[in-house]
Image: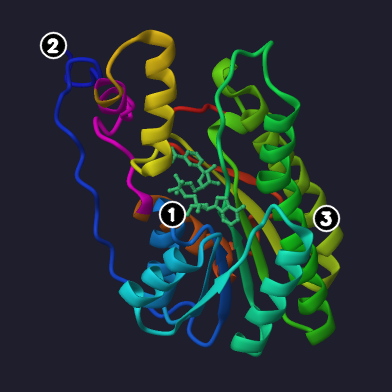
Amino acid sequence: MSKYSTTDNVRPLPVRSPDVFPVHRGKGIIVTGAAGGIGRAIAELLLAEGATVIVADLREDAVAATVKSLGGKSHGVAMDVGSQESIAAGIAASEAALGRIDGLVNCAAIVRHADPLEISWDDWRRQFEINLFGAYEAARLVAKHMIATGTRGAIVSIASEAGKKGHKESLAYSASKAGIISMTRILSEALAAHDINVNCVCPGGVATPMLREVSVAYSGVTSEPPEAIFDKMTSQQLVRHLQPIEVARVVSFLLGDAAMLVRGQAVNADAGETPY
Ligand SMILES: NC(=O)c1ccc[n+]([C@@H]2O[C@H](COP(=O)([O-])OP(=O)(O)OC[C@H]3O[C@@H](n4cnc5c(N)ncnc54)[C@H](O)[C@@H]3O)[C@@H](O)[C@H]2O)c1
């Protein structure tokens, strides 16, 4: 057995616990999809790093439960990122609660699986409305607020390795994430003059409710039990599932002043699976 072999190496690499510093002290940051797996981890980390955080998600009860469990300087805003009106109301409520908006994290998304030649119009529409149009609309309104208030902010969207490589089982989802990558590059250029930094993050399979949904959908194709599929969706290099907090740390970096030279990028947070 080679000491560099990844196939023979069954030792999972531990999740690390870096020190947490108040790098976002005094900032107000909105996180959409914050009641979900990755969004909640982002909200929790940003709070620990000193920010006031808007926990934005679809359902009022999930938002309230998340705010209750996070505590600290978190505020809940129920918002449907698939609706332009709801986003406008949600960003206005966030502005009222925060006073000023220094950051936005577009994390809300849905995934639907289908045969690549049988995707319904409705599946295309919903995934694009929620995953891409909603992210654009929130970014647009937040950028306008930042420009009007002279705030040097940052916008980070959660794309996916699916937006680079893509999967035939989730063609429309993959295309919506490729749209996020393109939107990010262009918004970065458009907003640079206002000192607003725009990036996105491309996670690999992260152990969240969404990955469980993916396992159930794949199970319909392969007839393997969902649990077995979920267990296999691990990182080759880490020999375990990626954890939401590990994605959150990348997002936190991109929201911060230390990321000044990283602009318009689609930063992989997939433990080395995607080579570009
Ligand atoms: N889990 C993964 O393996 C993985 C991999 C790559 C990228 N991502 C991306 O990471 C982000 C978070 O995914 P997750 O794994 O935490 O999923 P999740 O399902 O746990 O969380 C998604 C959240 O988005 C919310 N949401 C859905 N539709 C909404 C709407 N219309 N308005 C407001 N909120 C809405 C849901 O209520 C949920 O809380 C997504 O953008 C996803 O595409 C996830």
Q: Is residue 149 left or right of residue 170?
A: right
Question: Is 50 placed above or below 86 here?
Answer: below
Q: Where, quadrant-wise, is the N terminus in this rendering? A: top left
| Of residues 95 and 102, the one drawn nearer to the viewer in this rendering | 95
Q: Identify the main secondary structure in magenta.
A: loop
Q: How far across and how far down the image is residue 145, in percent?
A: 78, 78
Pointers 3 and 1 in contact (CB under 8 A)? no
Q: Is residue 124 visible?
A: yes
Residue 36, numbered label: 1
Residue 141 magenta-drawn? no
Q: Earlier in the sequence, mark 2 or mark 3?
A: 2
Q: How far across and how far down the image is residue 208, in percent?
A: 36, 44
Label 2: which residue? Answer: 1
Please name the residue shown 41% across and 61% down the image.
40
Q: Quadrant of residue 159?
A: top right
Q: What segment carries the magenta color?
A: 228-244
Q: Earlier in the sequence, mark 3 or mark 1?
A: 1
Q: Quadrant of residue 19?
A: bottom left
State which mark lies toward you, 1 or 2.
1
| Type of the residue with mark 1 | Gly
Residue 189, numbered label: 3
Residue 184, numbered label: none
